[in-house]
Image (spheres, rainbow, N blue to C red):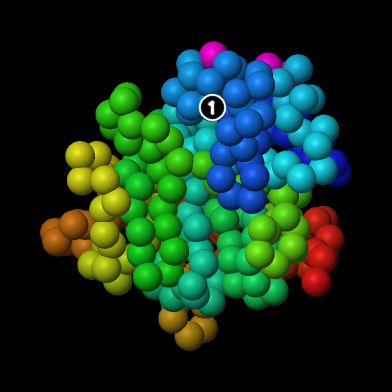
Amino acid sequence: MSVLAAALEYRQLGFAVLPLHGKQPYTRLIRKTHGVPVIPRLLARGAHEEHLRLWFSRPDVNIGIFCGEPSEGLVVLDFDDCEFPPPGMRLPLTPTVKTGRHRLRGHHLYYRTAEPVAIQSFPWGELRGWPKSTNGSPVQVVAPPSRHPKTGRSYGWQLPYTEVAFTDFGDVDLGDLAAEDSKLQTPSWSSNQRGSSGLTFSPRTRTASPPATTRTRGRVAHRRRSSQYASTPLMPASRTGLQTSRQTV
């Protein structure tokens, strides 16, 4: 699928897209369609199909997707510096991207939420959410089939949205270690950790086990076990039989 075709399809999914030069907003193209290269103007006016056709007809343009409210509550878990999936986390199946950063590492998990979730960084990567404050500008994520600016590898859907629905982020549990090591990027935005249910990746066997407790910003919150995900298969480190974008070595 071409970059333009993918961008048009993301727009149909309710995602707010923007052109990227590498991983940063392609300001020259945004200026051409919106007058000024500023994100608030782009968000206020939106991007129409003719904008997308102008932006993504160029071969050097990557696709960016805004997280948060502009994309109907999109929240992305960015796993960069770790094996995937990390132990001790409960990650229900959801559309998943293999990034172009590394042959083995680098995964984006796409969730949706109806409530604000603050942007946070962790030793393993980043939680790309959206702020409570309506004045806060959202972050973006690089989407397939964009190419990584350093490696040249393409981003690809490891678990496509055509095969699994976008899961509610409230069903995710990042575990004790993530809560203790997290660092809020923007202190004025308050995080919203919601009660959840699902499966936990056991550290060694990666079998499903019921959650016990999880620490949320220094407090212990007891979680109820639900049967909603009792039969949900765990996401393997690599899936076979799924269509993925070809990677350029």
Q: Quadrant of residue 52?
A: top right
* 115 lies above or below 209: above
Residue 31 position, x and y percent, is 60, 23
Secondary element at image label 1? loop
Check the picture and name the quadrant holding the N terminus.
top right
**How dense is the environment of label 1, judged by Cα within 10 Å: few (below 14), some, or many (20 and up)?**
some
Question: Residue 169's spot in the image, x, y percent?
Answer: 43, 45
Q: Which residue is mark 1?
A: 37
Q: Kindly identify the residue that appears in the image at 30 percent across and 71 percent down.
A: 177
Residue 46 falls within the magenta-colored stretch: yes
Residue 17 shows up from this direction = no
Q: Quadrant of residue 238?
A: bottom right
Residue 76 at least partly seen: yes
Provide the residue span drawn in magenta. Answer: 45-49
Q: Residue at x 32, y 24 (%)?
A: 134
Q: Position of residue 67 (x, y in %)?
A: 49, 38
Name the residue at 20% across, 46% down.
Answer: 187
Residue 247 inside the magenta-drawn segment: no
In the image, what residue type sits under mark 1?
Pro
Q: Residue 16: image x %, image y %?
A: 58, 29
